[in-house]
Amino acid sequence: MSLGYHLISTVYKLHIRPAFVVNLYAYMRNRLGFWDAETTTLYTRIVSQKSGYMGLYYGIEYLWKVNGLDKLLEYLIDRNFDYLAACKRAEVYALLASIYFDKDQETSKMFYQKSSQIDGEIPNNYLQLRSYSEKETAECKKILSRIHPLMKNMSSIITRLSDVSVVGNSDCETSKKQGEMIDSSSVVIRFNRYSTEDRYAEDYGTKCNIWVVNPAILAELSEVDSTANVLILSSTLIYGLRTDMWKALPSYMDRYEIFYFEESLYQKLVARLKAPPSAGILLLSAIYDVKGSLNHLQTFGFSHSVAHYFDRKKSRFSRHNWVGEQSILEEYLA
């Protein structure tokens, strides 16, 4: 039996919450690779028996957001299709409609209609499902028309990337006084909740032309302190954005050109890292894939340190494989 099977079995026997089982399984599957058909069968049994439809729903939603509709997720959905289809829960139907949107429009629309009959608001949590609703179609199309896949549009951005500083949020540049060098670049790229407060300027600079940001952060911000004119959403599942995320987007559309990362790039990095890639390695990989090198870039604030320079008490998100990302970066820069 696999190590994954033994770990999940132990958690199950100790009566630990099913939500923990879901996250443990996802961690093993994405970070450690400890999964097989046997482990998957046990996982499915646990989340269905211990927490019913919603346990399975949260597990499938998590895996979809982390890794897209891969073979493992197809296996889980196919194995439990009749069970899920009979659940009569609007959020379950909406999730299945969204997952099937690009694969099977007929099935997707069927689940959308089922979800709408139970609760008409829930399907609209998924941006693309709004295209099934006549009253929502115009707004949905307007949003989608202003958000573009990054790699397909890289040629229009590439001319701006001749002299670039890419500034990560690791604290590894503290006390190195690189701020002036960073700001002398024609283009500076920053990530998420970066800070340009005076106390960090000497080491990290203040300039920002391209902002790569998690959509969840946009939804949380009451005001934006950024001089950037290009915004790249660090999300491949642009159509799966929560309601609060896509509702925040129109307020940014007049100020920024908005892009998002394609699924193929994300999946390639997940396969190598065994973990979801960070926004930083997604961006550097996108540039590397188009230009073939990063010789025109200067990188700052990238290391396997787990602390942000602007909040050294708080660790960076641990689900990323920082050591593996550092190895990839070193390859790109070699």
Image (spheres, grey):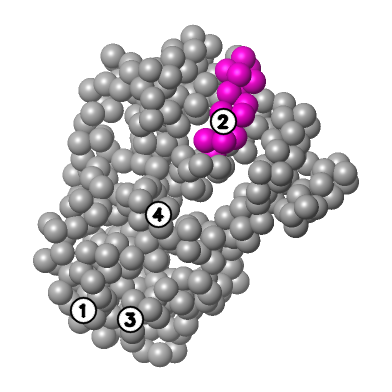
Q: Nearer the viewer, residue 160 or 322?
A: 322
Dot 3 or dot 1, earlier in sequence? 1
Residue for point 57% across, 18% down: 85
Given this view, does label 3 or label 1 mark the residue nearer the observer? 3
Dot 2 or dot 3, earlier in sequence? 2
Q: Which residue is mark 1?
A: 296
Query: Looking at the magenta stretch, what is its main secondary structure?
Result: helix
| Mark carried by residue 77 | 2
Dot 2 or dot 1, earlier in sequence? 2
Q: Which residue is mark 3?
A: 333
Q: Which residue is mark 4?
A: 266
At which x and y percent is residue 160? 14, 67
View extreme (right): residue: 14
Q: CA distance from mark 2 to mark 3?
A: 41 Å
**Residue neighbourhood size for the residue with mark 2, other residues' Cα within 10 Å, grouped as few (<14), some (14–19), many (≥20):** some
**Labels 3 & 1 near each other (Cβ < 8 A):** no
Given this view, does label 2 or label 1 mark the residue nearer the observer? 2
Inspect the image, locate mark 2, and give the three-letter code of the amino acid beneath it: Ile
Q: Nearer the viewer, residue 258 or 95?
A: 95
Inspect the image, locate mark 1, and give the three-letter code of the amino acid beneath it: His
